[in-house]
Image: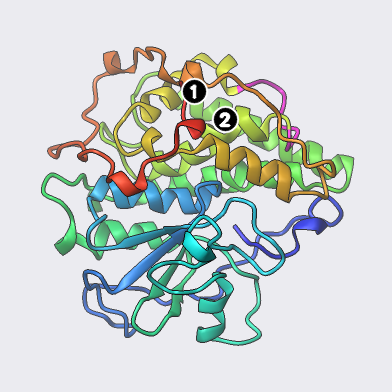
């Protein structure tokens, strides 16, 4: 999610920029960035669905000790994502006030704005990559030497074609579709995007009516990518982005599926509803000029029984759930269901 041009949203046609920095951190270091414990820092916003993919993947794979994480203020300013949640307003590892400083060390005059997730090389302070589509796949496949014992295989080789197909449909119509609807500047543009969102959600509901997860009987990258949109749906996309044909909580299958994931270690324990709501409603002044943040919806339902275990499935395959959230990474009480 970019920190550039926030006031323009709602006043110009929305178009998601491609990631400009597409270097990869790999086991063989072929791009000059080898996997190495402690060398890189993952910069995220808990408000951002694209960054939240990386937060979930990192936790499921047990990479907390190998890959440190910086959490930005959910309300950024025109200078980009900022570290105002940290003492003295500086990231304690990188020593910078704004994520843009790591971008500037890599390249000046770069296109596409400053976005999260971002992986930064700690020794040099330079951005390595902001390729949100690739980062989590590489965490799953290139960082295996640093995975915890019992880490799940989130991108199994034998299922990748199917996972890729599902993720492409989810990205086009759901992940990105809610933004096209929310930032539409013309009625027709909005109606087409909103219609596509709900058409795809209905198809996904049909798919999930007879199976616990999107692909196979275990959690995969596909589930992570759908979850990060679903968990924001009623809180921001239904009202703020006008995706209001129905609420997630009104769709029995998708609501149960989302609750199942939320209650799975590694998913809900990374979600901060306070950050999510404050970011969308306070930053997107083009479509919410008052900056007022709604009180609802009630979050208690996220902890209610979901019944999805009756469909079978093995969440972590032959592996095990992740352990407790590290103390310094726990979501504050105001961001969690009571």
At mark 1, the secondary structure is helix
Instruction: Evaluate if marks 2 and 1 touch, with contact meaning CB atoms under 8 Å apart.
Output: yes
**What is the magenta segment's predominant secondary structure?**
loop
Q: Is 76 left or right of 255, judged from the image as shown?
A: right
Give the side of residue 165 with respect to residue 144, left or right. right
Q: Quadrant of residue 281?
A: top right
- Can residue 26 be seen in this snapshot? yes
Which residue is nearer to you in this view: 92 or 338?
92
Q: Secondary structure at mark 2?
A: helix
User: Does residue 158 appear left or right of residue 239 in this picture?
Assistant: left
* Tag 1 residue: 254
Image location (x, y in percent) of residue 193: 73, 41
Can you give x and y, in whole percent of width and height, for residue 25 in the image?
Answer: 32, 73
Crowd band around label 1 with a 10 angstrom C-alpha radius: few (<14), some (14–19), many (20+): many
How far is mark 2 from mark 1, CA to CA? Answer: 8 Å
Magenta residues span 240-247
272 up-or-down from 124: above or below:
above
Placement of 337 over or under 29, stated as above or below? above
Residue occupied by mark 2: 201
Q: Decide whether residue 212 is among the magenta residues.
A: no
């Amino acid at each position: 999610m970019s920190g550039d041009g926030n006031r323009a949203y709602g006043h110009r046609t929305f178009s998601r920029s491609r990631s400009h920095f597409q270097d990869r951190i790999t086991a063989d270091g072929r791009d000059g960035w080898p996997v190495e414990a402690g060398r890189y820092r993952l910069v995220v916003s808990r408000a951002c669905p694209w960054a939240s993919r990386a937060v979930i993947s990192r936790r499921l794979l047990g990479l907390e000790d190998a890959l440190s994480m910086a959490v930005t203020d959910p309300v950024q300013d025109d200078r980009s994502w900022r570290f105002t949640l940290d003492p003295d307003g500086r990231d304690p590892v990188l020593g910078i006030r704004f994520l843009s400083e790591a971008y500037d060390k890599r390249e000046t005059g770069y296109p596409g704005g400053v976005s999260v997730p971002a992986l930064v090389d700690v020794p040099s302070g330079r951005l390595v990559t902001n390729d949100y589509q690739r980062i989590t796949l590489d965490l799953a496949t290139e960082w295996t030497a640093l995975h915890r014992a019992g880490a799940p295989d989130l991108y199994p080789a034998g299922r990748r074609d199917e996972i890729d197909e599902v993720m492409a449909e989810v990205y086009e119509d759901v992940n990105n579709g809610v933004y096209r609807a929310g930032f539409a500047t013309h009625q027709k543009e909005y109606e087409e995007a909103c219609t596509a969102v709900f058409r795809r959600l209905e198809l996904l509901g049909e798919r999930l009516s007879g199976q616990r997860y999107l692909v196979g009987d275990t959690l995969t990258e596909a589930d992570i990518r759908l979850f990060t949109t679903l968990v924001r749906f009623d809180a921001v996309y239904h009202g703020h982005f006008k995706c209001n044909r129905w609420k997630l909580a009104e769709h029995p299958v998708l609501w149960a599926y989302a609750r199942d994931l939320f209650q799975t270690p590694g998913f809900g324990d990374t979600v901060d509803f306070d950050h999510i709501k404050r970011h969308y409603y306070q930053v997107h002044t083009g479509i919410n000029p008052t900056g007022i943040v709604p009180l609802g919806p009630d979050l208690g339902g996220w902890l209610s029984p979901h019944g999805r275990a009756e469909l079978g499935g093995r969440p972590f395959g032959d592996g095990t759930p992740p352990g407790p959230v590290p103390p310094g990474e726990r979501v504050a009480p105001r961001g969690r269901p009571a």
